[in-house]
Structures are given as structure tokens and as C-alpha cells.
Amino acid sequence: MHGYSKRQAHELKRVAHAGEEGPAPYIHEALDILHVDRIDHGNRCLDDPELVARLARSGMTLTLCPLSNLKLCVIDDMAHHPLKRMMESGLHVMVNSDDPAYFGGYLTDNYLAVAQALNLSRDDLAVLAKNSFRGSFLDEAAKARHMAAIDDYIAAYPG
């Protein structure tokens, strides 16, 4: 907690792991006590409809790490990963790797795994890529530049 309170003086962003293996109330605590700027994981938010609504309203980014979720038995099969349900619920989710050397999956591997298992569309993948920039701590101009590059790529290579 002390580290989280000191961050304000140094203009550092707050991020916390919450709701991966632990229950949805851990996500509430990260929001209400730690005042985080982003949630790492957050898979279990779907257990609490009020929390889902709150996260959707606020635009809070949830960083999902599908392959580590599988390795840690958070899910028993990639087809059961909550990513698509989270997107359909209006949540601002992005795909990440989590200790890729340990869990055996870098960013591209994570995208490929969920794209195949959840039958994600090209538009879904573009939203996830853009969410990565929206949820980053880059300045607004850099975010806009990177999201425009995604749009340019999609336009140049129509599906």
C-alpha cells in the first residue's frame, strides 16, 4: 500500500494483479483501495454483473494473458477463456503475455491461441490491438498514432 501511495508524487501509474485466480472482490479492492489505473487479468469480473458494468463504464483496461491462464489452470481449455465474453460485455480488454519464457507463449502465441479457440474475427483482433494502445501509458498523441497505424494496416490488407 505504501508503494501505491508514493506513486502519486512521482506520477507513476498503478497496476495490480486481481481477479485471475482470486475472486471478483479482489478487483473491487484494487479499484477502491489501490485506485489502480489498470487491472492485470481480471478474468473473474464476470462473476459480478455490477463489477462488469462498473468496469465497462469506466473504460478500465484489463490485461488478459490466455496462455498463462491455461498453464496456471485458471481455465481448463482455451475454448473456455472469458476474453470473448468480456469483449461482448463491453469490457476494455487486451491480450498480453505473462512471463513468456516461463509459460511458453509470447504475445503472438497468445493472440493466435485465443483467435483460434474463440473464433475471433479480424475486427475482434483489431479491437484487441487498439485496446493495447488505449490501455497503455503512452501519451495521447502516441496512442493515436499507433491506433491509426492499425487502421492503415487493416485498410491496406482488406479481409
Image (tube, rainbow, N blue to C red):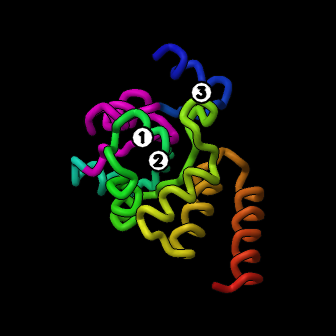
Of residues 28 and 146, the one nearer the viewer is 146
Could you tell whether 110 is left or right of 69 in the image? Answer: right
152 above or below 65? below
Q: In which quarter of the image is the N terminus?
A: top left
Amino acid, disc 1: Asn
Q: How crowded is mark 2: few (under 14 residues within 10 Å), some or many (20 or more)?
A: many
Extent of the magenta region = 17-46
Whether residue 19 is visible: no
Q: Measured from the top left, where is residue 77 in percent x and y?
A: 35, 50
Between the C-alphas of marks 2 and 1, the distance is 5 Å
**First-in-chain label (3 vs 2):** 3
The answer to whether 89 is drawn above or below residue 158 in the figure is: above
Q: Which amino acid does label 3 sit on?
A: Gln
In the image shown, does 40 or 106 lie closer to the viewer? 106
Q: Label 3: which residue?
A: 8
> With 72 as the anchor, is 109 left or right in this view?
right
Real-space CA distance between mark 3 and mark 1, rounded to the nearest whole angstrom: 31 Å
Checking the image for residue 66, the label placed there is 2
Residue that carries the numbered disc 1 in the rendered image: 69
Residue 3 found in image quarter: top right
Residue extending farthest top: 2
Q: Residue at x 48, y 35 (%)?
A: 36
Q: In this view, does 5 lie to the left or right of 155?
A: left
